[in-house]
Amino acid sequence: MLQLPGPELVIAPGRAVEWRVHTVTGGTPAPGRTPSHNQEYHFVACAPPPGQAEDPDGRPGPRTDSFAVTFEIDGRLDEPALEAALLHCVRRHEVLRCDFRPSAAGGLDIEVAEPADVKLERIDRGTTASTAEARAYAERFLRSTDTRRGPWFVMGATVRRDSATVHLVCDHLVTDGTSLMVLVHDVATAYEAFAAGRQPQLPLPGGFLDHGRAERERAAAARPDDAALAPWRGFIARNGGPFPKFPLDLGIEPGAGAPAVNSTDPLLDRAGAAALEARLRTLGAGVPAGVLAALGVSLRAEGGPDVHRALVPVSTRGRGRHAHGAGWFVNLVPVEFPVPEGAELAPTVAGVRDASTRMVRAGRIPFVVMLRLLAPEHYARPWPHAVNFSSYMDYRAVPGAARHAARRVAGYTSVPATNGMFLWVFRSDAGIHLNCVHVDTREARRVKAALIGTLSRTLENMARHGTF
């Protein structure tokens, strides 16, 4: 399983079919079923500029930050079984049955259809007769979601005589990286069951709207002087604001945006990743801490500061009933640790462990609530400058990971524009890779190329020699 740039989505030619969510009776208001803080923040931030219409004829185009995933089916496709599997998935996850609309107060309202009131609208997209036509179709499919107007989840398949490619695309409003893997596992498992004349056997998923409501209830009483916000207050004071700047020059003015470049590069092969894990275990740390340390040291070597400050996404789904749920189960927290010149592995990793403890404390309050309380001037606005943002994800731990190779699962990110550089480090059975999205400037291309080389060498040295 690799996380790849959207433009690398390649589907062999065939007959293209799509399915979209359709409610029989229309959604019903959901009192008490509020969106999560992330959903509301993202929805409001994607609003058109003041004075610009929101209807399809009055906007230059939809906002299409999206995630896609594909898997392969060998042999002749049982199309009724696939359609049944897709409907089963939508009925199973309430976030896929939601309709999102601006509220009168400028926020976000949700209507939720009952499972029995949902059906799928089948759309025949015709046959792609060449690789070029198939690539063009894949590009259109990746852009088929829209944060403000919907659809938020589109399903499709490219069907051939002896095989099929199933492809799903979700707007960020309804998914995170793990949720995308949950969905592909659910659809593939349900398809195999229905094709064999059986009912799918899958764990019960926790509802994302319940998760969002509980999150809001926990944070409702938070105030600017709340003790739970102490880690954020300290970070903001030392950083000069809640958004740590990307430490290298990307050739773009603060606040400006431009088309994005998206690429995935290998950092360590499978053996190297295993060696890194073993090395870090001797220091009482895991691979996520080691990757953070390597990023800090590598940016320092490329001209960055001797204190690494970044925003890091962390999962909020836990290991209970939400482990098999779909939604946006993520909070954003600050990380801060020293990376002096000549840094050594053990003390740097220890600094990351201390930073991780502070991250956990900072994560008790949702990032969006923190912004409202401590930095309201940044709420529901684009990030003010290129932000130092990095994440780590182990795809070997997600539901269905054991079947990724057999199903030939691949994930894709589609981010059309940005104002900085975002670093998604992930581990799979193939090793450790970096999916990087950055602004399309000459300086950013140079920074990214240099950083890949330095980060690869740093991780290799950590794994083999216990040094940076």
Image (cartoon, helix red, strand yellow):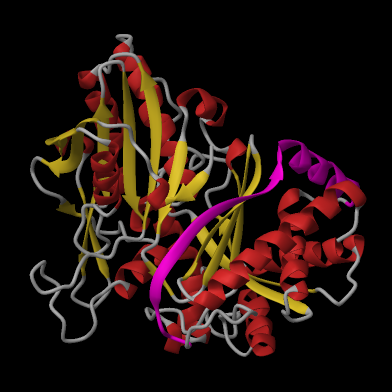
Q: Position of residue 348 (x, y in %)?
A: 85, 66
Q: Position of residue 253 (x, y in %)?
A: 47, 88
Please name whichever residue, 180 or 211, is drawn nearer the observer in this view of the structure: 180
Q: Which residues are the magenta region? A: 254-283
Q: Is residue 269 left or right of residue 377?
A: right
Q: Which residue is drawn at 69% across and 84% down?
A: 234
- Taking the image as drawn, is residue 328 in sight? yes
Q: Where is residue 293 in the image (x, y as percent from the top left)?
A: 77, 63
Count how many numbered circles sit on residues in the image: 0
Quarter of the figure that contains the C terminus: bottom right
Please name whichever residue, 196 or 322, is drawn nearer the observer in this view of the structure: 196
Q: Residue at x 54, y 73 (%)?
A: 444
- Taking the image as drawn, is residue 220 in sight? no
Q: Residue at x 65, y 80 (%)?
A: 247
Q: Which residue is drawn at 8% across and 70% down?
A: 57
State the residue lying farthest toward the top: 197
Q: Is residue 282 above or below residue 382?
A: above
Q: Position of residue 292 (x, y in %)?
A: 72, 61
Residue 282 part of the magenta segment: yes
Q: In which quarter of the image is residue 132?
A: top left
Q: In this view, does 431 lie above or below 77?
A: below
Q: Quadrant of residue 445?
A: bottom right
Residue 174 part of the magenta segment: no
Q: Is residue 29 left or right of residue 1?
A: left
Please name whichever residue, 253 or 318, is drawn nearer the observer in this view of the structure: 253
Q: In this view, does 413 lie to the left or right of 317?
A: left
Q: Is residue 16 left or right of residue 165?
A: left
Q: Is residue 424 above or below residue 137?
A: below
